[in-house]
Amino acid sequence: MNRKTERHRESSGKIWLNQRLPGHEGEKDTVSVGIMKRENAMLLKGRRFRFSSHSTRKMISSTFDNRTLFKFFLPAGIFMSVFLLFPLLKLLYDSFFDVGDNYEGRAFVGLKNYAKALASRQFQADSLHTAVYVVVAVSFETILGLLLAVVLTNKYRGFKAIRTFILSPLMIAPLVAGLVWKFMLSGQFGIVNVLLVKGGLLHSTDGILWLSDSRFALISCIIADVWLTTPFMMLMFLAGIQSIPDSLYESAEVEGASKWQIITKIIIPNIRGVLFSALVIRVIDAARTFDIIWAMTQGGPQGSSEVLSVHIYKMLQRYGDVGYASAMAVIFILVLVGITLATQFKQKRSS
């Protein structure tokens, strides 16, 4: 409805508006000064806000021009080029050559190093060890981390102290953790075998040679890895669970859902993104593990706990075969990148 204001006059704390309204021509509407002042203030406030926002955008656009953005990006770009891009290109370049000891002389061999790696039984065996290590370790870490996150979600007396105690392995370096578990699993004075003897599961402390028996060497390294990185998985899941609305739990309780149904029907579906991210991070991290295995077994005995990262290190440092080690490293990197891209594509399709 269109209104045409003819005259404004303020008198005795009132504002009189002469307006021509359909059916009320000639009548005067009285509006209190308080209402008009409030409306005018809101209008002026909106204008000031729009003016301020426009000025801010203009200032930002004039300040952060392309040259400024380039200066901000330059340090990170130099760092990535020196410590990531150049080593990758050098690795790829060396994989096509047969490099002599101490880099003295090199002969171009093309894809010979790649063919040698793919046909090597040791490379195939180490690839199998790596796959077993990743699947077993990440599976246990995911299950234990999820259970601990569900338990620690409920607030009870002392839960903060328990949470801090469980997260303590994250403060330990992998190399130190490997050395700790090496002493704990020792067949001579290891506390694990001592406890098993006291529990009646072993007759003597050398009943199981965890690090010297090829049947248990890889399992021992997996145990140490699970102990070290389960808190990380728990922390990721705990952050996801705490973001779930309480209304979902209340609805489940009203419907009489069990604890298992709450976990499978509410918690897991709502933390699917967090679960996926944690799995991708852990799969890549477990596949390239080196510190724990090197500290505990160095890939022995008889290569039973040797994974690809350890095998590549030995070929490079002990035997000086730069080209062959570079070719294996390139294959390893391509596999990890392929796994990451495949999982991201699958998540995008499912979402």
Image (cartoon, rainbow, N blue to C red):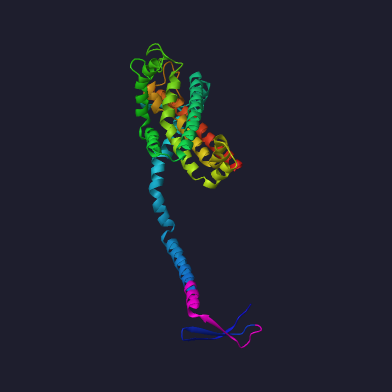
Point 44% across, 57% down: residue: 66
Residue 195 colored magenta?
no
Residue placed furthest toward the right: 23
Residue placed furthest toward the bottom: 26
Q: How many numbered marks have been drawn onto this rendered protein structure?
A: 0
| Range shown magenta | 22-42
Residue 269 placement: quadrant? top right
Percent position of residue 33, x then y = 48, 80
Percent position of residue 7, x then y = 54, 87
Res. 293 visible in picture:
yes
Residue 34 colored magenta?
yes
Quadrant into which the C terminus falls: top right
Point 51% across, 40% down: residue: 274
Quadrant into which the N terminus falls: bottom right
Point 42% across, 53% down: residue: 70
Q: Does residue 21 lie above or below 216 as drawn? A: below
325, 323: nearer the viewer: 325
Residue placed furthest toward the left: 189
Q: Does residue 251 lie above or below 329 as drawn? A: below
Q: Is residue 152 left or right of residue 187?
A: right
Point 42% across, 64% down: residue: 59
Q: Is residue 36 left or right of residue 313?
A: right
Percent position of residue 337, x then y = 51, 35
Percent position of residue 211, x then y = 40, 18
327, 1: nearer the viewer: 1
Q: Does residue 29 lie above or below 170 as drawn? A: below
Res. 101 visible in picture:
no
294, 266: nearer the viewer: 266
